[in-house]
């Protein structure tokens, strides 16, 4: 049964791309599912009882009445599929109203037909259940007017006139109208209270969901705040190490950290500063090595000796010093041979 109803909901309810988010949307969905369930019931009843109207009907207008009722039910399916729940529910209400009213206006009013008026309770209940509760009051008023007009305008049988002469109008007229009024008011009160209860439950669910969302937000905010404090502490520690001369210090933060976008440029900057410091140190050593070589060459020139540099300076001028050593050595050998 559950699988069958799921299949029926799929073909009779509007297709949705996302779940209902607001209480209004959820209430509309509830109305739509209830309407489509009653529509299925009315379709089954029409399939079972419809042929009787054509084969065994004592009223010549019965096939037309049954057809109009079936058309109203089919229109209810179409409107519900289009998302027009009010129109769909109205068609279900109209289906029963047409059946009852059609029967009463196509036959002389007879005591045997008076109980048929009681069937107008069904559309009143349907209106209150499938539409806003005030619809039950409206439909009850309309049905009461239908009962009154049929009683006043429709042709009476002799038996009905005799019943009226006996003072039984309370049975034929007052009782059906009273039933309509009582059922309409009771339906309105019950359904209205039920809807208010459901709405309170929806609001309670929303409040719980909102509280959960706020708690999650606060938890995430606290986590981010804790991450932020730890990240700032690490960055401050790296700054302290850099100030102490440790240019190899880096901010050890992962890509998930809230300060990752700050740590990456800082680490890149520190890498470049370390390169600049290394290049500056090399330049300083090179300048010192050049000054040393100049002094040595000047001293050797005054002493009329060739300048020889036996130790490497670890700077870019080491190849130059090697060439100077070579030239000085060759010059010394030439002077000795001479």
Image (spheres, rainbow, N blue to C red):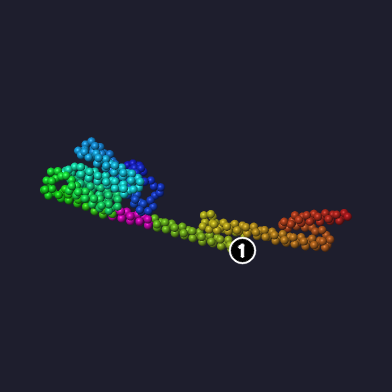
Q: Main secondary structure of the magenta part?
A: helix
* x, y percent for residue 130: 29, 49
Taking depth in this image into account, of 21 and 81 the one nearest to the observer is 81
Q: Quadrant of the N terminus?
A: top left
Residue 107 vertical position relative to residue 297 in the rendered view, above or below: above
Taking depth in this image into account, of 130 and 141 the one nearest to the observer is 141
Q: Is residue 108 magenta?
A: no
* x, y percent for residue 301: 82, 61
Residue 40 in sight in this render: no
* Residue closest to the far top: 55
Q: Is residue 87 left or right of residue 117?
A: right
Instruction: Name the quadrant containing residue 43.
Output: top left
Residue 49 vertical position relative to residue 295 in the rendered view, above or below: above
The residue to which callout 1 is attached is 244
* x, y percent for residue 196: 30, 55
| Few, some or many residues within 10 Å of mark 1 (<14, 14–19, 20+) | few
Q: Residue at x 54, y 62 (%)?
A: 233
Taking depth in this image into account, of 248 and 284 the one nearest to the observer is 284
Residue 330 in sight in this render: yes
Magenta residue span:
193-208
Q: Residue at x 24, y 39 (%)?
A: 63
Q: Residue at x 44, y 58 (%)?
A: 217
């Amino acid at each position: 049964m559950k699988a069958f109803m799921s299949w029926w909901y799929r073909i009779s309810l509007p297709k949705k791309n996302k779940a209902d988010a607001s209480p209004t949307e959820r209430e509309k969905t509830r109305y739509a599912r209830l309407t489509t369930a009653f529509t299925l019931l009315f379709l089954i009843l029409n399939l079972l009882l419809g042929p009787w109207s054509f084969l065994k009907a004592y009223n010549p207008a019965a096939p037309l009445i049954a057809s109009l009722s079936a058309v109203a039910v089919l229109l209810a399916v179409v409107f519900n599929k289009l998302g027009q729940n009010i129109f769909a529910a109205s068609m279900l209400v109209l289906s029963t109203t047409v059946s009852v009213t059609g029967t009463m206006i196509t036959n002389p009013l007879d005591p045997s037909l008076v109980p048929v008026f009681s069937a107008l309770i069904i559309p009143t209940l349907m209106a209150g259940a499938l539409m806003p509760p005030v619809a039950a009051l409206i439909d009850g008023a309309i049905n009461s007017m239908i009962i009154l007009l049929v009683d006043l305008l429709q042709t009476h049988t002799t038996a009905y006139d005799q019943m009226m002469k006996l003072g039984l109008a309370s049975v034929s007229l007052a009782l059906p109208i009273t039933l309509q009024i009582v059922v309409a008011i009771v339906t309105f009160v019950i359904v209205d209270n039920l809807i208010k209860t459901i709405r309170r439950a929806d609001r309670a669910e929303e409040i719980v969901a909102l509280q959960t969302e706020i708690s999650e937000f606060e938890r995430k905010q606290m986590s981010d705040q804790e991450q932020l404090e730890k990240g700032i502490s690490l960055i401050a520690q790296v700054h302290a190490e850099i100030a102490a001369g440790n240019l190899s210090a880096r901010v050890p933060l992962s890509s998930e950290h809230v300060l990752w976008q700050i740590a990456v440029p800082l680490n890149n900057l520190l890498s470049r500063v370390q390169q600049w410091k290394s290049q500056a140190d090399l330049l300083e050593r090179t300048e010192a090595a050049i000054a040393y070589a100049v002094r040595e060459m000047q001293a050797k020139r005054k002493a009329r000796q060739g300048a020889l540099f036996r130790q490497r300076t670890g700077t870019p001028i080491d190849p130059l010093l090697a060439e100077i050593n070579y030239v000085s050595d060759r010059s010394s050998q030439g002077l000795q041979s001479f």
